[in-house]
Image (cartoon, rainbow, N blue to C red):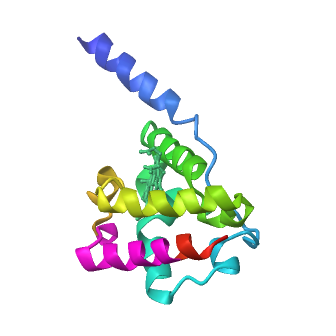
């Protein structure tokens, strides 16, 4: 029993040395959605609070990101999230992809898939009220119709 605990402790200590790379960029985000399309202030604030940690080139990390394997788990969310949708690279998408992503934003919010529930559990300020959801989806829908 003692050996097992020692082994688990040793593994825990060793994995602390394997840190995933952080999603932090000091560059100006020239292809950010806000540089090319109108994003009203209220919507921008909501997206930054509820989505940008996983869907932009800059994540604001919590203290527990210093602990493995938590950091691996968070990094997985950020990498997967960015691959699906990156607000900081939005302007690099084709017209079709832009429209598709805006459509998915509306859909994922309406279905309660986004922001991820594991995220809002801790980041309670990222939980969107019905009105906040509407603010984002109305903007996304009108932009989807505007882009051509
Ligand atoms: C904790 C990280 C996290 C947060 C916060 C988050 N997402 Fe996601 N998002 C993901 C991950 C991971 C995926 C890919 C896997 C999946 O679809 O569940 C994803 C996928 C998506 C997709 C594409 C696939 C789909 O489900 O339609 C859209 C659109 C999206 N997110 C929008 C948003 C919006 C809008 C917000 C804010 C209201 C948000 N996300 C907040 C992690 C996050």
Check residue 137 for magenta coloring: yes
Q: Quadrant of residue 114?
A: bottom left
Check residue 83 for magenta coloring: no
Question: Does residue 24 show up?
Answer: no
Looking at the image, residue 115 sits to the left or right of residue 104; the answer is left
Instruction: Decide whether the magenta segment is chiefly helix, strand or loop.
Output: helix
Q: Which residues are magenta?
A: 125-142
**Residue at (26, 14) in percent of width and height:** 2
| Quarter the C terminus occupies | bottom right
Please name whichever residue, 34 or 97, is drawn nearer the observer in this view of the structure: 97
In the image, residue 111 lies at what x, y percent? 29, 56
Looking at the image, residue 127 sits to the left or right of residue 139; the answer is left
Residue 31 vs 81, above or below: the answer is below
In the image, residue 11 lies at what x, y percent? 44, 23
Query: Among all residues in the image, which is located at the extreme bottom?
Result: 41
**Residue at (51, 30) in percent of width and height:** 15
**Residue at (64, 46) in percent of width and height:** 21
Q: Quadrant of residue 43?
A: bottom left
| Quarter the N terminus occupies | top left
Question: Does residue 64 show up?
Answer: yes
Please name whichever residue, 46 or 78, is drawn nearer the observer in this view of the structure: 46
In the image, residue 143 lies at what x, y percent? 55, 75
Total labels: the figure holds 0
Residue 67 vs 56, above or below: the answer is above
Please name whichever residue, 111 or 58, is drawn nearer the observer in this view of the structure: 111
């Amino acid at each position: 029993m003692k050996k097992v605990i020692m082994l688990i402790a040793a593994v825990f200590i060793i994995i602390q040395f394997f840190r995933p790379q952080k999603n932090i960029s000091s560059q100006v985000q020239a292809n950010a959605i806000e540089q090319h399309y109108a994003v009203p202030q209220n919507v921008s604030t909501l997206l930054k609070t509820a989505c940008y940690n996983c869907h932009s080139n800059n994540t604001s990390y919590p203290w527990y990101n210093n602990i493995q394997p938590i950091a691996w788990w968070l990094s997985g969310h950020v990498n997967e999230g960015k691959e699906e949708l990156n607000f900081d690279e939005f302007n690099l998408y084709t017209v079709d992809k832009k429209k598709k992503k805006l459509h998915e934003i509306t859909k994922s919010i309406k279905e309660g898939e986004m922001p991820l529930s594991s995220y809002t559990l801790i980041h309670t300020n990222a939980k969107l009220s019905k009105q906040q959801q509407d603010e984002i989806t109305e903007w996304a829908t009108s932009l989807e119709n505007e882009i051509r």
